[in-house]
Amino acid sequence: MQTLTDVKTKFTKETYLYWYELMLLLRRFEEKSGQLYGMQKIRGFCHLYIGQEAIAAGAMTATKPGDKFITAYRDHALAIAKGISAKACMAELYGKATGCSKGKGGSMHFFSKEHGFFGGHGIVGAQIGTGAGLAFAEQYLGTDNVVLAFFGDGAARQGMLHETFNMAMLWKLPVIFICENNHYAMGTSVERTSNVLDIYKLADAYEMPADSIDGMSCEAVHEGIARAVARGREGGGPTLLEIKTYRYRGHSMSDPAKYRTKEEVEEYKQRDPLTIVEETLLKNKWATEADIEAIAERVKQEVEESVQFAEESPWPSDDELLKDVYIQEDYPFIVD
């Protein structure tokens, strides 16, 4: 197993405050999304990120604005972290024209070129190859930007992963492959689907540097991604990070999650990153109880405003139906 150059960071009060407010916003946004789904305000599929927020927080402080993110369908939190407004995200969940994908994508297909967020992909594992393509574009253009391609432990079974790993290593692409391992894919444990339980070891076949990261710790996520980002910017090529995390809810809103025990869920909740960061702020006297309450009120207001914005926004017009669909007018292989 190739190792990465160690990156040790002394985290500041400002970093912890940023992590706390961001994670609280992501948590409250997802909780509200779940409520609205139950009220049938949000339709279709809906996959919540509750419990995994430390990954989004650590990824943001370890990267710069020009870096690109791409992920699967559990995409709300990463989209908001990358800078898409809660209003645009909630409007997209509602299917409204003011949504970040103009109401055409819904929960699984958030997108913003402006913010460097390239989806939101419903095809399992598709974003792994597309993420490498984005990294090739950055390399071709001569930037020092890197691409973070997020996927779940279930997607690690896809053939796309192996083809992409081989090509990414050959071309030394500036891409960090991040497996958000929440242990159950759609509802089947890693132990029942793979002979290799440590997913980061899949990188060995390609001599790709890899690491296993505690996904319930903002600090560990930041340091792990920072090491991989530094390598990517310097032309060292791709890295695989297995970030071990846990979702408190089911795979989607229709999943009762009966494949795991309540005791297991509660055990992980004892390591909740929001609670840990809040305790760090209070212990170091970087925030008072009043400060924490003020952050909570600010986040509550932002989420409420996003709902109001979605409620009041218009539906897409009929003439939007065929827009944004790629068509080659002179395509030579159409047979009537």
Image: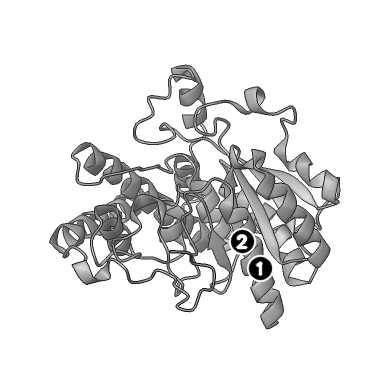
- Left or right side of 130 for 78: left
Mark number, residue 103: none
Residue 22, picture quadrant: bottom left
Image-quadrant location for residue 316: bottom left
Residue 236 appears in view: no
Relative image position of residue 82 (x, y in whole percent): 47, 64
Q: Label 2 sits on what residue type?
A: Gly
Residue 241 drawn above or below residue 201: below
Q: How dense is the environment of label 1, judged by Cα within 10 Å: few (below 14), some, or many (20 and up)?
A: many
Question: Of the numbered discs in the image, which one, if any, rests on residue 135?
Answer: 1
Q: Residue 41 location in percent, x, y?
A: 19, 46
Viewer-side residue, 168 vs 267: 168
* CB-based contact (under 8 Å), mark 2 and mark 1: yes
Per the rendering, the mark at residue 131 is: 2
The image position of residue 2, as x and y in percent, is 86, 50
Element on which disc 2 rests: helix
Q: Residues within 10 Å of mark 2 (few under 14, many from 20)?
A: many
Which quadrant of the rendered structure holds the N terminus? Answer: top right
Q: Is residue 188 left or right of residue 298?
A: right
Helix, strand or loop status at disc 1: helix
Left or right: where 168 falls relative to 86:
right
Residue 170 % position (x, y): 82, 62
Q: Residue at x 66, y 68 (%)?
A: 135
Q: Nearer the viewer, residue 124 or 242?
A: 124
Residue under the image location 86 percent in, 51 percent down: 207
192 above or below 2?
above
Q: Is residue 143 above or below residue 292?
A: below
Q: Nearer the viewer, residue 318 or 306?
A: 318
- Residue drawn at (25%, 67%), measured in percent from left and top? 98
